[in-house]
Amino acid sequence: MGYRISELARVSGFSPSTLRYYETAGLLPDPDRTGAGYRVYGEEAVERLAFIARAKTMRFSLSDIAELVALWADGPCGPVQDRLRDLLDAKVTEVGSHLAAMSGFAAQLGHLRTSLATARPAERCGPGCGCDTALPAPAGPGAAQEGSAAPVVCTLSIPDAADRGSEWADLLTHVSERHKAQDGLRLRLPSDPVVVARAADLAVRETQCCAFFSFTLTVDVQGTWLAVTAPPDGQVILAAVFGDPA
């Protein structure tokens, strides 16, 4: 069975212009041509585009996808899995680094917002007024005062935060349900002792570096739930690490 480019676009979900671009970029081989010069694609093109679509959901670069497609086209699955594993490891580290950077920036913005809310408006904007407040430096360990709310900061270094983000990302693959809750969300986990132990271990370690998080692990006949809450200034970080509560 052959597909014209409009038919392949309908079946694959890619636009005709994208398909032409993929040919130019080498992701699709040159198709056969009819006597009138129209492109005709076979079933292999449909399978190839389905593979490309899955790779795109992982936000790989076009060059990475082209490399995976070339391995996929060779036939054996082993090399594809090996390369995919390497790319996923790199992507998890990259996402963890972004999370750490965004976590620190969100904490700085939260402190700035609090300072602005308590500053008395001056007659004119200038040095010393609330609008002139600079972003504070990220707080380090022990920044919280006894009896006060924990600051919305993460005290991990960026490499350590990337590793922690990878651990959470791996655990969250086991989540089967996600529900919005007051000040956070509830995550349903399998009632597997190994998974429950990992969740408890991560929660304890997370509160040591991000004390503004609060965790509740509930295990009963109805299943296993991990509840995560944070103050208003920490909601951005909560969503970045655990997913949007909404």
Image: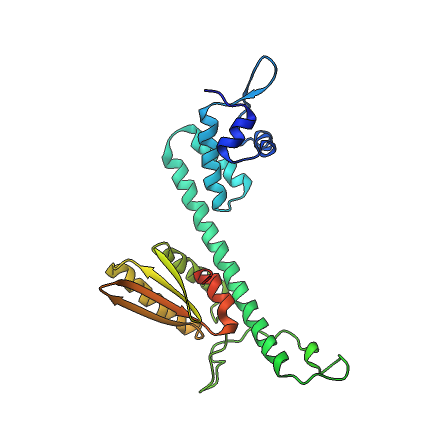
Viewer-closest of 223 and 173: 223
Viewer-closest of 235 and 152: 235
Q: Position of residue 204 (x, y in %)?
A: 35, 71
Q: Residue shown at 45%/36% (left/top)?
A: 51
Viewer-closest of 61 and 242: 242
Relative side of 74 to 59, left or right = left
Relative side of 191 to 167, left or right = left
Q: Position of residue 100 (x, y in %)?
A: 50, 63
Identify whether 190 is placed above or below 220. Answer: above
Identify whether 110 is placed above or below 99. Answer: below
Q: Position of residue 84 (x, y in %)?
A: 43, 42
Identify whether 154 is placed above or below 90. Answer: below
Q: Residue shown at 37%/70% (left/top)?
A: 205
Q: What's the image's color scheme?
A: rainbow
In this view, which residue lies farthest toward the left? 221
Viewer-closest of 78 and 43: 43
Locate the N terminus and report the quarter of the image it occupies.
Answer: top left
Q: Residue shown at 37%/34% (left/top)?
A: 77
Q: Residue shown at 48%/37% (left/top)?
A: 52
Indicate the quadrant where residue 207 lies.
Answer: bottom left
Q: Position of residue 237 (x, y in %)?
A: 49, 66
